[in-house]
Image: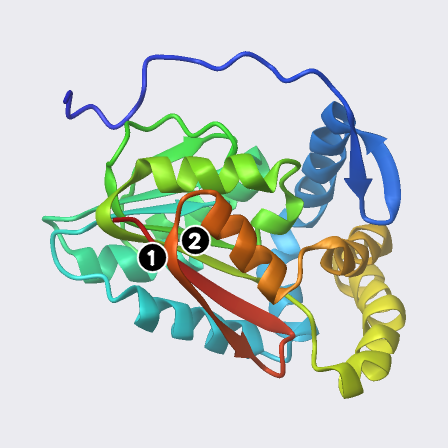
Amino acid sequence: MNDDPLRSDSSAKDSAGTTHFGFTQVREDEKARQVAGVFHSVARKYDVMNDVMSAGLHRWWKAFTIRQANVRPGMKVLDIAGGTGDLALRFARQAGAAGEVWLTDINASMLTEGRNRMLDAGVLLPVALCDGEKLPFNDNRFDVVTVAFGLRNMTHKDKALAEMRRVTRPGGKVMVLEFSRVWAPLAPLYDAYSFNVLPWLGKRIAGDDDSYRYLAESIRMHPAQDELARLMEQAGLDKVQWFNLTAGVCALHVGHKY
């Protein structure tokens, strides 16, 4: 197989049906535009808001993901919807000079923030502006494929998971870190925080309450832990397991390709 990581073929556009954008039904092609608008708006304040709205817990969630990934020198890693590069930077240091770590995102503003952060850290990684549902990489390319807080925003999650499996080599794994279903007794308090405090913080810090209202709505529309595990299995991944983090506020799903 050609060692060029990028595929030469392209996929035809899907016919536009309807899907959800938060609690609102929109055309599928319109959702992509609206999600892009959300992340263009918050890109510069993305890391600050993550720290504030999660009280720094997102750093622990990502550290747990990195430990579970167990990237070793020489490995090839793909980080999808990698945003400002938290995972990619750590993976690059673990994979070393003999490894290969790609930072990708569908949003140019987020990818620019991530690339600049890499450069500030003295790390030069390959980056690609691409859609997680149509990855421009060859089959069986990567040892580890990750997506952190990005699958929730994809229109066709089944296609994205199938693509993640396709580019993973046999023996490799796919990892999805995403907001999930919180422990039921905490749900009323979590809802109050999500729909009242988060938009207020977004307005005060990022100058954008609508984007953080969408965040709260999109979490409720995302599949619960067991549903996402089934989607991963239907995409052809094996031995899918998940880890609830912070009482299910967030969950890490891991599936293997054999």
Q: Nearer the viewer, residue 30 or 221?
A: 221
Q: Residues within 10 Å of mark 2 (few under 14, many from 20)?
A: many
State the residue position of label 1: 89
Residue positioned 85% across, 56% down in the render: 209
State the residue position of label 2: 85
Q: Is residue 83 left or right of residue 92?
A: right
Residue positioned 29% across, 58% down in the render: 91
Q: Residues within 10 Å of mark 1 (few under 14, many from 20)?
A: many
Quadrant of the rendered structure where residue 32 is? top right
Residue 112 seen anywhere in this rendered image of the structure: no
Residue positioned 72% across, 59% down in the render: 219
Q: Is residue 136 left or right of residue 59?
A: left
What's under tag 2, amino acid-wise? Gly
As drawn, the residue found furthest toward the bottom would be 185
Percent from the top left, x then y, of residue 47? 58, 62
What's under tag 1, amino acid-wise? Leu
Distance from Cα at disc 2 to Cα at disc 1: 6 Å
Q: Are marks 2 and 1 in contact (CB under 8 Å)?
A: yes
* Quadrant for the N terminus in the image: top left
Percent from the top left, x then y, of residue 104? 43, 39
Residue 118 seen anywhere in this rendered image of the structure: yes
